[in-house]
Image (cartoon, helix red, strand yellow):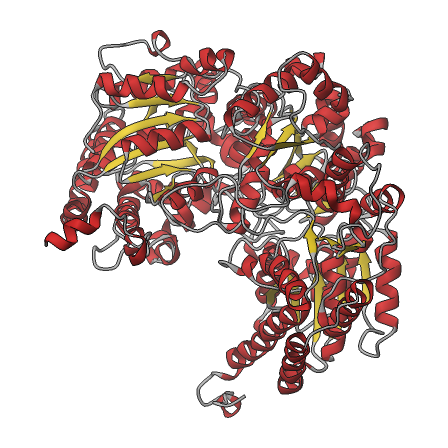
């Protein structure tokens, strides 16, 4: 089936909406659109960052997931206490693949879980005393940790605990930073508010720790914001920035440390990869410390080269030459990768449904391989994300916000893409449907995908999934539809 | 730099010199403590002194081996025909439950939430229930919606029964549409408790007020209640035994189809499962066999008091004797003999035990996992001559402890074993350093203990044998069987080959240890 034109795409949206009861239909209609590149303000055609419809299978998570799972978890020397019942800490352990370098349980804590395992009595009598004691226990068993964060689960905000008071008191006692994070799962409408709350908590409890005490640094100091080092993404990015002559003084938050957070105010430029989850702190640093920030995109050689040049444009000729040197150095490898994989992927259609950044950020990488993104949507984007998305997508692309499982399946059934990129909750339904699928949150246990080295892995992975023989074996030979038989006879 | 002929993913890419340099340079910005101090501290975490500190913990759980109630409630709901699991509370929980099962079963998991947010936390979640049930019944073509709760709804005290009743009264859903429910507070018990609560909720909903004319024995069947069971083979082996015995049965909660649908080109949200008619007829069974009896207290009470079943006292049918006992009990209750085919299967297991005993006898193995699973596994280990050392159960209860003590005391191989009820995997880590077992048996979470013990030195490494839930890092093991003689065969094969694999690892050094690198073992 070919690409949908505008009318067909709009008809498809109407058809999909048919099944909802009236109120839900009205609500969902606002979250689905057909791309129109002439629109400059997405709010005119799509609604986002609103409550999910009850009883409809949203793929979204919660503020705790956005805080503990996304922003805090990857900082390696901070111990994150999942404060509340046992489940949240357990479910958020080890699934995200934010890599770190360190000794687990001694100076790094990313792959562990720490929980206050709330019992009924903690709900009834409050958990503040328990939290205070728990912080002492953390301190006695993990003396080399550099800081502690308290990640609030739903009950904390409901039972009136004062974790801020406990955090202040314990911080003084143990001489380490203790950050209370009010990321209860019922706050906001998705992971997104958890990012924002976490950015604010870092602003309020950490970032100014060395104000007035920081040295000047060098003119080439930059920080990476919004790279969670999934499968080593930040390392594959850092190597390029360093090769062009920059000093990466901090990684937020993949493989990051609290010292890096505290040293970020000496950066001369903040480089923002995931705009959605860390634009808040970038804006704060701009306001407070006068640090400019820019968004960049390290998916695929076209966008990488554009980004390297734009980054370099903030610096002197040494860095500008450095950028050109880096681009030239990797060009032959990129050419070889594209020569190998483009013929195998040319013209393949992709539908994406991810968090708040990748559906627009990976378009260039797919295009470098000759592939085309024909549908894109986000779990928790805001309108500023859709503003950016409209520009990246072709006209008549389907765009869907907080799509339900049902909507995604219907869109895919009708559009018949050659590849779907989304998350683990979506993955296996598409496997059953015979649609090649890659997880685009965790890189499907592969990666890195950022940077030049990452693009080689990206190309390899898209090819292996699109072209694996498994997709052609769904029907047993005796299951061939009866209508085909006369043709066989004729032949 | 990558080369097109040999594209390297994270490992071994980051082991290359250029990336090792990147990491070394990054280190200069990290202000980490010195590597000597880290090494010294690591060593300290392996000591008895650290263990004492570790066991003195009163409030902190580190690396848990349990999950929360609604996860269990959701698995229970999956076992009924065309049933949509509906979770009243925050949506993030539901994303986590789905993800957790996706990763274990490698299957799509359909649960829905009613997405309570701040306003619902203040005003209560009734609006969410009404709207949610209306949408769910319209969208998902379910025959039943099974509702359980997350902690937000429990903390604010939502009256689930009233909300569902009102939804029917006010026309959000058809008044005859079946919506059983259970309260599954995550701050009580674990996922095991949640399964028990949801199951009891479903049984209660369909049978409490329709007991008239029903009596034990009327339908000539027996009921089988699995409990929180994640090995698909376990559903299948029990069914096969019933078939071979000629016993008519009802599997009360049967998700083995929906968790194992074929790739056909179409995604089917529902498959198989216990029907509502079967549930309604369940009180007429001769009796009910509960396969995980120490953890299904609420269910037991309901079935005994409402259905008037005399529930047979059985242990989980794992290993030889407890499978024997289970089959004998089924035979006794139904009057059907255990057929030659099953006796032959038993004989094959015993034959395998004779073949492999020399590799297992006297091996020391630590175990962790869910209570009934651990109990059954330990029982079988004792039958194999394996010596369980540290037995960790994060979500145990008093009944389990009592039963476990009895099991251990009854065997010379069990007398040295120690029970660690309520302990977590950081406790077990300490134990693996100070009193090293040959192996750990448990879920994927055990792999970090293997890594940490190896870090101390190759001679300290405690390899993990993956049996239990969840298993995220090996494929398709959830399809295997741990119950019955067939399950014994799988466990025996797994344990024996783990021992042999380990021996090969240690004896494969050319000219050093390979005198024992035998072709035949």
Is residue A432 or residue A51 the one in the foreground?
A432
Q: Could you tell whether B329 is left or right of A399 in the image?
A: right
Closest to the observer, A369 or B68: B68
| Residue at 68% across, 52% down | B251
Side of A372 relative to A88 (left or right)? left
At horizontal 32% and vertical 9% (from top left) the residue drawn is A41
Image-based side of B306 in relation to B228, left or right: right
Q: Position of residue A443 (x, y in %)?
A: 39, 44
Residue A319 visible in this rendered orientation of the protein: no
Residue B287: x and y in percent read: 81, 54
A57 lies left or right of B131: left
Q: Nearer the viewer, residue B179 or B281?
A: B281
Query: In the displayed image of the protein, which residue is found farthest to the top?
Result: A44
Q: Position of residue B369 (x, y in %)?
A: 70, 57
Q: Position of residue B216 (x, y in %)?
A: 84, 50
Query: Which residue occupies 28% across, 31% down?
Result: A415
The outermost residue toward the left is: A491
Quadrant including the C terminus of chain B: bottom right
Residue lying farthest to the bottom in this orientation:
B515
């Amino acid at each position: 089936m070919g690409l949908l034109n505008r009318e067909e795409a709009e008809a498809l949206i109407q058809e999909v909406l048919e099944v909802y009861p009236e109120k839900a239909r009205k609500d969902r209609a606002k979250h689905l659109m057909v791309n129109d590149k002439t629109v400059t303000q997405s709010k005119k055609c799509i609604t986002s960052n609103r409550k999910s419809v009850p009883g409809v299978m949203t793929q979204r998570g919660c503020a705790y997931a956005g805080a503990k799972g996304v922003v805090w978890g990857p900082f390696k020397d901070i111990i994150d206490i999942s404060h509340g019942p046992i489940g949240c800490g357990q479910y958020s352990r080890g699934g995200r693949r934010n890599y770190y370098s360190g000794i687990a349980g001694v100076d790094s804590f990313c792959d562990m879980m720490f929980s206050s395992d709330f019992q009924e009595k903690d709900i009834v009598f409050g958990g503040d005393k328990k939290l205070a004691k728990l912080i002492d226990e953390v301190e006695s068993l993990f003396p080399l940790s550099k800081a502690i964060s308290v990640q609030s689960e739903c009950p904390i905000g409901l039972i009136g605990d004062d974790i801020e008071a406990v955090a202040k008191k314990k911080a003084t006692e143990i001489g380490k930073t203790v950050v209370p994070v009010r990321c209860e799962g019922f706050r906001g409408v998705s992971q997104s508010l958890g990012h924002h709350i976490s950015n604010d908590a870092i602003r309020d409890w950490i970032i100014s720790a060395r104000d007035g005490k920081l040295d000047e640094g060098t003119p080439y100091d930059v920080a990476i914001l919004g790279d969670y080092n999934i499968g080593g993404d930040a390392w594959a990015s850092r190597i390029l920035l360093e090769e062009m002559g920059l000093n990466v003084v901090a990684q937020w938050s993949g493989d990051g440390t609290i010292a890096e957070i505290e040293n970020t105010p000496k950066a001369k430029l903040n480089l923002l990869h995931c705009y959605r989850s860390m634009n808040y702190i970038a804006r704060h640093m701009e306001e407070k410390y006068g640090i400019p920030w820019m968004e960049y995109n390290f998916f695929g050689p076209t966008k990488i080269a554009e980004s390297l040049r734009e980054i370099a444009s903030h610096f002197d000729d040494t860095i500008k030459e450095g950028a050109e040197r880096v681009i030239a150095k990797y060009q032959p490898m990129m050419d070889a990768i594209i020569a190998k994989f483009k013929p195998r992927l040319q013209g393949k259609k992709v539908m994406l449904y991810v968090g708040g950044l990748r559906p627009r950020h990976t378009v260039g990488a797919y295009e470098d391989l000759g592939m085309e993104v024909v549908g894109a949507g986000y779990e928790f984007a805001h309108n500023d994300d859709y503003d950016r998305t409209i520009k990246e997508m072709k006209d008549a692309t389907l765009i869907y916000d907080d799509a339900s499982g049902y909507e995604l399946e219907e869109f895919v059934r009708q559009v018949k893409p050659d590849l779907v990129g989304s998350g683990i909750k979506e993955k296996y339904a598409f496997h059953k449907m015979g649609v090649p699928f890659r997880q685009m949150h965790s890189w499907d246990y592969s990666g890195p995908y950022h940077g030049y080295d990452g693009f080689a892995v990206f190309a390899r992975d898209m090819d292996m999934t699109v072209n694996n023989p498994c997709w052609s074996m769904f029907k047993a030979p005796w299951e061939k539809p009866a209508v085909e038989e006369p043709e066989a006879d004729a032949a | 730099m990558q080369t097109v002929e040999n594209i390297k993913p994270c490992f071994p890419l980051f082991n290359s010199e250029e990336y090792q340099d990147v990491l070394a340079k990054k280190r200069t910005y990290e202000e980490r403590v010195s590597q000597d101090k880290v090494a010294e501290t690591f060593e300290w975490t392996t000591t008895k002194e650290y263990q004492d500190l570790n066991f003195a913990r009163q409030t902190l759980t580190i690396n848990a081996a349990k999950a929360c109630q609604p996860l269990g409630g959701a698995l229970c709901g999956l076992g009924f025909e065309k049933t949509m699991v509906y979770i009243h509370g925050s949506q993030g929980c539901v994303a986590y439950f789905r993800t957790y099962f996706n990763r274990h079963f490698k299957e799509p998991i359909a649960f829905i939430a009613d997405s309570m947010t701040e306003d619902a936390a203040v005003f209560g979640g009734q609006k969410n229930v009404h709207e949610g049930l209306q949408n769910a019944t319209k969208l998902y073509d379910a025959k039943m919606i099974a509702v359980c709760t997350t902690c937000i709804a429990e903390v604010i005290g939502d009256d689930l029964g009233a909300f569902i009743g009102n939804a029917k009264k006010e026309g959000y859903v058809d008044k005859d549409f079946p919506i059983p429910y259970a309260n599954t507070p995550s701050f009580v018990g674990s996922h095991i408790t949640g399964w028990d609560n949801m199951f009891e909720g479903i049984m209660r909903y369909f049978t409490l007020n329709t007991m008239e004319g029903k009596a034990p024995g009327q339908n000539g069947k027996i009921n089988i209640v699995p409990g929180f069971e994640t090995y698909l083979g376990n559903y299948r082996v029990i069914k096969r035994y019933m078939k071979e015995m000629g016993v008519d049965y009802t599997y009360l909660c049967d998700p083995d189809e929906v968790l194992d649908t074929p790739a056909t080109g179409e995604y089917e949200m529902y498959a198989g499962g216990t029907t509502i008619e079967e549930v309604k007829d369940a009180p007429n069974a001769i009796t009910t066999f509960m396969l995980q009896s120490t953890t299904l207290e609420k269910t037991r009470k309901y079935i005994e008091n409402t259905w008037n079943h005399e529930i047979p006292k059985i242990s989980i049918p794992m290993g030889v004797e407890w499978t024997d006992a289970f089959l004998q009990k089924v035979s006794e209750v139904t009057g059907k003999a255990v057929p030659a085919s099953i006796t032959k299967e038993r004989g094959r297991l015993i034959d395998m035990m004779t073949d492999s005993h020399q590799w297992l006898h006297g091996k020391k193995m630590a175990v962790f996992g869910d209570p009934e699973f651990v109990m059954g596994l330990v029982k079988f280990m004792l039958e194999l001559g394996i010596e369980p050392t540290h037995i960790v159960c994060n979500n145990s209860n008093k009944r389990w402890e009592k039963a476990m003590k009895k099991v251990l005391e009854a065997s010379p191989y069990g007398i040295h074993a120690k029970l660690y009820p309520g302990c977590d995997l950081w406790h077990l880590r300490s134990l693996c350093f100070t009193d090293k077992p040959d192996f750990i048996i448990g879920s994927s979470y055990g792999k970090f203990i293997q890594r940490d013990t190896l870090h101390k030195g190759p001679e300290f490494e405690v390899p993990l044998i993956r049996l239990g839930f969840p298993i995220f890092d090996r494929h398709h093991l959830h399809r295997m069987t741990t119950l019955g003689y067939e399950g014994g065969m799988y466990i025996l094969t797994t344990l024996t080959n783990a021992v042999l694999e380990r021996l090969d690892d240690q004896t494969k050094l050319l000219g050093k240890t390979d005198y024992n690198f035998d072709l035949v073992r």
